[in-house]
Image: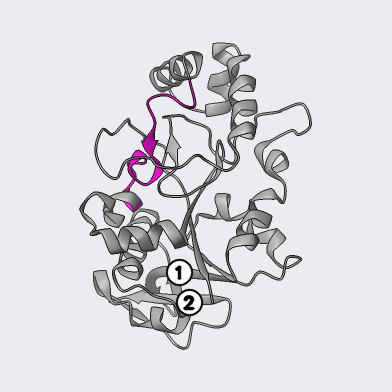
Amino acid sequence: MSLGYIISPAKKMNLVEGPPYPTSTPRFLASTQELMETVQKLSFDEAKAVWKCSDTLAQLNYERFSDMNLKRDTTAAILAYEGIQYQHLAPSILEQEPLDYLEAHLRILSGFYGILRPSDGVVAYRLEMQAKLATEHSRDLYGFWGSRLAEALAEEFDMLINLASVEYAKAVVPYCSDLNLPVLTCLFGKLKDGKLIQRSTEAKAARGSFCRWCAEHAIEQIDDMRAYCERGYRFDEELSDDNYFVFVEG
């Protein structure tokens, strides 16, 4: 069985001049070009409304888009994102074999790029999947991407391991049933009064740690994931089922 892990991107990005270097081109680059040109037509205030950020961040990203070249000054996607999840995935210190595993199995969902492999060259941008960016044929990015992301993943994998946030999973998971693509969602949290409580920051860290652990152990079967025990987590048999693997802290 071919497993594909889907994760969310991070808001903060930077140009990284170091290995692993970008060696591939994003699959949906033509669509990314269309989105770039749509953003470039916006006024500063319109772009800020789409981004929902401060004046300072809006100015930074407005300048990025005004001078953007999708084939220049790119960084490997696995290094370009700087969020908590990526800090715990720690790609810059992984050995080559785990990096090869991630290249084969890990896919990053993106409002701007659609789907990214770890080695795909990307530029710094801000465009979240839930952004209300209207294009010629859609009112937002969910409509823009439609079922294309799920269809692309179904071409590569027999099962998806969902480690994405709700906002990003929404761009893929609703289409998977019609494509006969099973989805296993992994949850990380603490039990309180018998209920699983997920803390956002810790969940991001756990997802990154879990991806790294799977890569280091070259996981090929979902049952082998039950052994994950980093950051004080343990697999909870009672809370888990065919659709959800639940890892409880403590």
Specify the quadrant that holds the N terminus.
Answer: bottom right
Residue type for callout 1: Leu
Which residue does the image show at 60% across and 71% down from the upper left? 158
Q: Is residue 160 left or right of residue 249?
A: right
| Mark 2, residue position | 245
* Rendering coords of residue 39 (x, y %): 59, 21
Q: Which residues are magenta?
A: 69-85
Q: Is residue 166 left or right of residue 223?
A: right
Q: Earlier in the sequence, mark 2 or mark 1?
A: 1
User: Who is closer to the viewer here, 47 or 64?
Assistant: 64
Q: Which mark is residue 75?
A: none
70 within the magenta span = yes
Q: Secondary structure at mark 1?
A: strand
Furthest-left residue in this view = 93
Q: Position of residue 84 (x, y in %)?
A: 32, 49
Q: How many marks?
A: 2
- Quarter of the rendering containing residue 102: bottom left
